[in-house]
Image: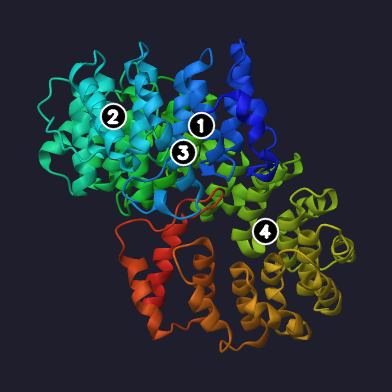
Amino acid sequence: MRSPAELDHVHWHDLTHAYGPAEDVPELIRALYADDDDTAGEAIHELYGNIHHQGTVYPASAPAVPFLAHAVLHAPGRRDELLMLLAVLADHDPRDTESPSWPGSSVAAICAELARVVPDLLPCLDDAERAVRRAALRVVAAVAGRLPADVRATAERRVDELYATDPVAAVRADALVVLDRFGRETGAFDSPLPEVRLAAAMLAAERSGPPYETRLVDILVEDGAEPDPGDDGFPWAGTRSQEDQLTDLLTRDVDAGLTAAARWIAAGDLGARGSWLGRQIAETWRDREPEAVALMLAALPHQRDTRAAARCLTTIGEWIGRLPEPGADLRDALYDHARGEEETAAPALLALVRSRDPRALELVLRDPGPETLGAAASCFPEAADRLIPAIRRTLAAGATGNGAIALIGALAQYGAAARQAQPELLDCLRTRRAAVVAARQIGRGGVVTPEITSLLHEAAQSTDSSLSAAAAVAHHRLTGEAEPALRVFEGLLAGQGPVHWHLSGLQPLGSAAAPLLPLIEPLLTARYEWTRMAAAEAHHKVTGSPERAVPILAALIGPTPVGLCALKALAAIGEVPDELRPTLRSFAFSPLRLLSAMPFSQVHPDEELRTLARTLLTTD
């Protein structure tokens, strides 16, 4: 350990943390000794922000360890928080045996420093406060495999004593986990303490992997139903709480997870544990949407407040479109909530719209909102004569931001009928409300007037590059004049910064963009994968030849956002290299979701990935 008197012996200015030179670390460590508890708390908060920033550690992190260990024993308070800071600094997946041994890595240096001070910290295992004992156990666990033999023997004996005698069941459960890190398998499935049984079952499930034995599932479901009433929320490896770990374990075995979620919801969904697990299963596994939606419906009556109920309704809305036929009970429940409190009415109405229940259309028209109007346009295309006027009124009332974007996106689904909204679109362009998407829709509308072309020409001179590009393309689509758009894109593609947005934007120009090929072709080998993808797509659109585009796009295909975009571009070209077919089959038939949901996306990216893969597999 090192006392604050030695802080100046470290060249902190030569070390770095999350925000640059670590010159502020000495003062933060000195603040831990302040009599003012708030000052010490703020210092710990700052240390979490700079030497352990969102799970990342830095060169300045390891030198701080011996000083933090001294503060644990000599600062006036917050011992549990300081111990937890030490534990998370050394955090690594215990299954990754190389991580704390990587030469020169920050985590290796931290583990080495922490292993040296563990003997001084072992008395914390006997502290009167349960939180301190639990945090101290996590410190020992973090470096269990790095301790010298004599220190390990002492630590293991002390932990064994806690496991056998501690009056707090949660501490005994923690001790069991640490003993497991020491390589001790303790058969505790028959322990009279639920916390200990649960810890033992979780350790066994981690070791075995899914599918889990029936007896393990029974323990996980029964003893995991209620959180420890005195839980300190302390994480283990991965900086997760035990509750998060349990959810993760049960999510990996989908049948065990669905069983647990159903049981927990039927028992009252305490702490929203069952509904949360159901949401995780839906986001992790394909084709389990019917079970997940049924769980959310069952959980609704148990929610303690409107915010919790809104979460269940939002989940239903996310997946109801994947149900073959939403049942009457589900639709009736959504209808009731859609007419209830405001916080639950919005997600309930959105879900009802996506269920295509006819009552939803009447509710949307009675109280039109951008998101529900956009969804209604997609789900009730036959109601264009009623929805387009509502969209126009909402735009005219001054909708802005994502709301205006959603409304204009809804118009895009109506083809020529959307021309009715030309006055509102022009006003959006004129007032710069969702002007980029308004310009695109105006260009698709096919209406040419002096006012429209003038507004687009003016917008094409905007300093907002996205607006300039969209307006230039719209002007070209309406007038056929390529020169103004070519001038805009020549400047954008030759400029600094990311250009992939602009490459995607020029595609409607088609062969008219041929003069830009000298700017596009060098981008086919750009370091940034998004730029290569957009350049390949643009090159095909401009030249009509897939020869250069297909190899670039095929190399980018993967379960990533850029890989999905490359797959869309490849589908538009209609060519599939034979070597890509095994990858496509993995996309098409994986039982797990390969992509996560994205904000503001109308279709789940994983559904797009699977559909595109299946389509391309049928391509000759």
How far across and down, in percent of the image, does residue 603 sit?
48, 55
**CA gap, disc 2 to disc 3?**
16 Å
- For the point 59% across and 59% down, the residue is 413
Q: Residues within 10 Å of mark 1 (few under 14, many from 20)?
A: many
How far across and down, in percent of the image, does residue 450 sit?
90, 66
The amino acid marked with disc number 4 is: Ala
The image quadrant that residue 586 belongs to is bottom left
Question: Are the residues tagged 1 and 3 within 8 Å (C-beta)?
Answer: yes
How far across and down, in percent of the image, does residue 563 sit?
50, 67
Q: Is residue 430 above or below residue 186?
A: below
Report the residue marked by disc 1.
66
Report the residue marked by disc 3.
113
The amino acid marked with disc number 1 is: Pro
Along the polypeptide, which appears first: circle 2 or circle 3?
Answer: 3
**CA gap, disc 1 to disc 3?**
7 Å
Report the residue marked by disc 4.
418
User: Helix, strand, or loop for circle 4?
Assistant: helix
Q: Residues within 10 Å of mark 3 (few under 14, many from 20)?
A: many
Q: Is residue 502 left or right of residue 168?
A: right
Along the polypeptide, which appears first: circle 1 or circle 3?
Answer: 1
**CA gap, disc 4 to disc 3?**
67 Å
Along the polypeptide, which appears first: circle 4 or circle 3?
Answer: 3
The image quadrant that residue 119 belongs to is top left
Q: Residues within 10 Å of mark 4 (few under 14, many from 20)?
A: many
User: Helix, strand, or loop for circle 1?
Assistant: helix
- For the point 56% across and 89% down, the residue is 547
The amino acid marked with disc number 2 is: Ala
Q: Is residue 97 above or below residue 128?
A: below
